[in-house]
Structures are given as C-alpha cells and as structure tokens.
Amino acid sequence: MATPNTPLWEVFIRSRNGLAHKHVGSLHASDATMAVQAARDIYTRRGEGLSIWVVPSSAITASDPAEKAMMFEPAESKIYRHPTFYEVPEEVGHM
Amino acid sequence: MYTQALNTAETDDRGLEDAAKAAQFQARIDAEERIEPNDWMPAAYRKTLTRQISQHAHSEIVGMLPEGNWITRAPTLRRKAALLAKVQDECGHGLYLYAAAETLGASREELVDAMLAGKAKYSSIFNYPTLTWADIGTIGWLVDGAAIMNQIPLCRCSYGPYARAMIRVCKEESFHQRQGYEIMLTLCRGSDEQKAMAQDALNRWWWPVLMMFGPPDATSQHSDTSTRWKIKRFSNDELRQKFVDATVPQAQYLGLTIPDPGMIQDAEGHWRYSEIDWAEFKQVLAGNGPCNRDRMAARRKAHEDGAWVREAAAAYAAKRTQRQTAQAAE
C-alpha cells in the first residue's frame, strides 16, 4: 500500500478548571487538526473535558522502566523530605 | 503510556527465553502488579494479548453493523438518538482497544488488515441478523449484558493498557444494557404483537448469547495459561452461569420465557441451562453463520470506500509539512 501508516498521537484532557491535563489514551490522525477533532469524538462524548492537548507519540521521551530501580532510588532513601520525619510536640498543635 | 514508538518487537523473547526473567515476570503477576508496554514479557503473553485485544476490538467494530441496520428505522426520535449514541460508543470502544493492542507492537494497519483478510476473528454473536426492532432491545439487554459480565473482570487484567481500556468501556456499557432493557420493557407492556415480537427476539438470541462466553471449560484451549497470567479471572462456564443467574429474573420481570424448557433452578438458586449446541458455535466461528459473509463484505467495502480519505489526509499532511519546512528555510 502506498499510503503510509497514520501517525499516532497521545491525548491529554483537562477535566475541570484548575485540574491539570491528564493522559487519557491515544489515537491515529494524519495531522494535528484532525487529531484534536478525533480526540473530541473518542474521548469527550460525555462531557469529560474542557480542553484537549494532542502530542505526536514520537515526540515523547520516556524513562526506561528497566532502569527504574536506579532512577528512583535516590527519592526512596530520603525520608527526611517528608513532613512526618520531624517531631513537633503535641502542645504546639497542628503544623 | 500508549506509545507504539516505545515498543520493541519480539526480539530476544523467542527461543531461549530467560528462565529467570520468566520467573520474575510470573512473580510480578502473582503480586498483582500491572505489566506495562515496555516491561519484559514472555513472547507468548504478548501474542495471546495481541490476539485477544485485537479480536475484542474487531468485535466492537463489526458489532456496529447489526445495530446500525436499525438506526434509520428506530420507532421514535428518542430511540434513534440513543441507538446512534450507542453505535458511536461501540466505535469508540473499538478504538480504545486497538490502541491497547498496539502497545504490544502491532500497528493498527496490520491488525485491521488481518481482520479484513479473515485471519483474525471477531465475536460469533455479530454473525446473527437483526430482523426486527425487538432485536435491538435484545442485543442491548443480553449481548451487552453478557459483554459486561465478561469485561468487568478484565478491568483487573494483568496488562495495564487493556485493563485501563476496559474501565472506560465498562463505564459506558451500562447505558447500553439499560437502553436495551427499556426497549424490551416497552414492547412487553405494549400490544400482543409487540410482546410476541420481544419473545421471538429472545428465542432467537438466547442460545447465541450463551455461546458468547466461549467453549465449555473442559474443551477451552486458552484458559490455563490465561488464568495463570491473570488475563482471565473467571472461567467461561463460571461467567456464563453468572450471566444466566442474573438474566432469568430480568426475563421473568418482562414476562418473557427463556427458550429452554429443560431449565431448572438448583438447590443453591442457580439456574441450570440445557446443553448448548456447540456444533452451531463451531459453524459460526468457521465462517458459516447466517451473516458472516455480509459482515465481512460490509467491513471490506467500508475500508475500501474510505481509502481515498486516508490518502487525501496523508497527502494534505505531507503538503503542509513540506510548506512549513520551506517557510522555515526562507
């Protein structure tokens, strides 16, 4: 077939004002305009969104799940980054 | 992440599968962890899921045909709007599922081509005709009811993208079943002819719907590994029994008779159905159901008729990209 495969897009939808755009899935479209229209039809048939972003899937750089141990270990060992690490006397009240 | 680009094909999975990796994979499944597209997985797991998810997607797409048959003839505007929305949902479900299947490394084009070439299957149920308006009620009530029974456990399937697609599908599917039951209720409260029409539809759909759950456990070829991999949470017979138990009281409420004179309620309250005609099921799967040829012809025609749209959209996108590149260079 002469026609190339239709590019893949990732779809992000902001559900309510104040909330961030969230990844909802993907779709195929030949260009960005058609991707937004298709996203409207596929992912917002029941008023799920007020705003749509589409991003070419090929433009996403992802971390390697095989290296997740090394990648996220530094965060796991630093319990002093959490508020519960610190002791505050009960008399002081909520802080 | 549903990114095809991040997926590598079955490279080193074949032949010498690392036993340690396989053990680690099974341990993750046993711990109820979700498997994600870029995680290591046995080649057979990838293959099984690609087959299952793409068949599921094809079923949603082919499933639009029997119901689409009645859109222009729906009895009222309310029914027509609801049916149109339902058929549109089925299309959406097909697209979520194709996207999930693609995370395993196959392209949309390959999956669709396999279906059009008759190499990939879709659910046997869509090879039966929709002869009257009551069939639309029966499909919503029973076919979608059976689908929900099957899909709710799939929301906990070990493969993340499939489970997430199923959650969306299940949320939308409950409208389908309710609109179907409402159609049946209206017919059953109507004239004698309308009630007879509802009974006739139930008579024709009952057994094919029971077949939707697949072959009996004793003969099912894919069940064991699928259960071990937590793709499947309940056996075919378990789901079928759950469906029958849920459906019998609904039929009684409608005042309809399940076309199974041998059906009895056992001591535990389960409705025991008679032997299913598996020869018919095999015939339909083999392509000899009442509508197999029609369905395939309709899908092929739709695909061919849409070719110029795909070509034009691709050409337009290429032209725009070229123009932008030229402008950037100036």
Image: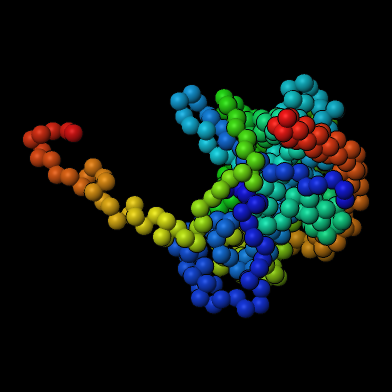
| Residue at point 83%, 60% (across, down) | B119
Here the colouring is: rainbow
* Image x and y of residue B54, in percent: 72, 54
Is B193 left, or right, of A95 in this rendering?
right
* Image x and y of residue B221, in percent: 70, 69
User: In front here: B252 or B13?
Assistant: B13
Answer yes or no: is residue B202 visible.
no
Figure quadrant of the C terminus of chain A: top left
Q: Is residue B17 above or below residue A61?
A: below
| Residue at point 27%, 46% (across, down) | A81
* Image x and y of residue B51, in percent: 71, 59
Taking the view exactly as shown, the residue that stands out farthest to the left is A91
Is B3 left, or right, of B319 in this rendering?
left
User: In front here: A67 or B267?
Assistant: A67
Answer yes or no: is residue A40 visible.
yes
Q: Which of the 4 image quadrants contains residue B269? A: bottom right
Q: Is residue B49 above or below residue A55?
A: below
Taking the view exactly as shown, the residue that stands out farthest to the top is B77
